[in-house]
Amino acid sequence: MAKGHKTGGRKQGTPNKVTTDIREAYQKLIEKNINKFDKWIDEVATKDPAKALTIIIELSEFIVPKLSRTELNSKIKNELNPDNVTITFK
């Protein structure tokens, strides 16, 4: 085998069989119990609402992509006035 050259095994980009099997099993587990999540969150919330919110936030990371931070350039930054900003929730 020449140094730096692959001569056997999986081709690059081919998923590991064990990893694939675990992901499939986990997906089946989630699909089987998806209807129970509301009940479980409600049970946690009755004892510890903050923990229930933390669970929801942690689970949302798998569905809603995280937003990357952006920097405002100085021209726009200087034009923003926090006194004129209104945030509304629907």
Image (tube, rainbow, N blue to C red):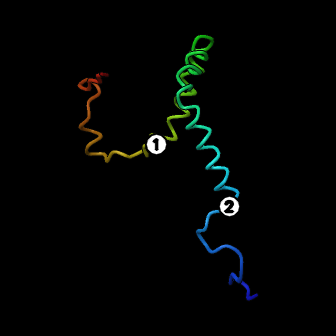
Q: Which residue is mark 2?
A: 17
Give x and y (percent) for residue 15.
62, 63
Disc 2 on helix, strand or loop? Answer: helix
Specify few, some or many for label 1: CA neighbours under 10 Å numbering under 14, 14-19, or 20 or more: few
Q: Nearer the viewer, mark 1 or mark 2?
A: 2
Question: As displayed, is residue 84 above or below residue 64?
Answer: above
Give x and y (percent) for residue 31.
55, 38
Q: Where does the N terminus fall, quadrant-wise? A: bottom right
Residue at the limit of the structure toward the front, as seen here: 32
Disc 1 on helix, strand or loop? Answer: loop
Q: CA distance from mark 1 to mark 2?
A: 29 Å
Q: Amino acid at mark 1?
A: Lys
Q: Amino acid at mark 2?
A: Lys
User: Which one is in front, 72 or 47?
Assistant: 47
The residue positioned 67% from the left and 50% from the top of the image is 22
Question: As displayed, is residue 30 above or below residue 37?
Answer: below
Specify few, some or many for label 2: CA neighbours under 10 Å numbering under 14, 14-19, or 20 or more: few
The residue positioned 68% from the left and 61% from the top of the image is 17
Question: As displayed, is residue 49 above or below residue 9?
Answer: above
Question: Can you tell which quarter of the image residue 84 is in?
Answer: top left
Q: Which residue is mark 1?
A: 66
Q: Earlier in the sequence, mark 1 or mark 2?
A: 2
Q: Is 45 positioned to the left or the right of 7 in the image? A: left
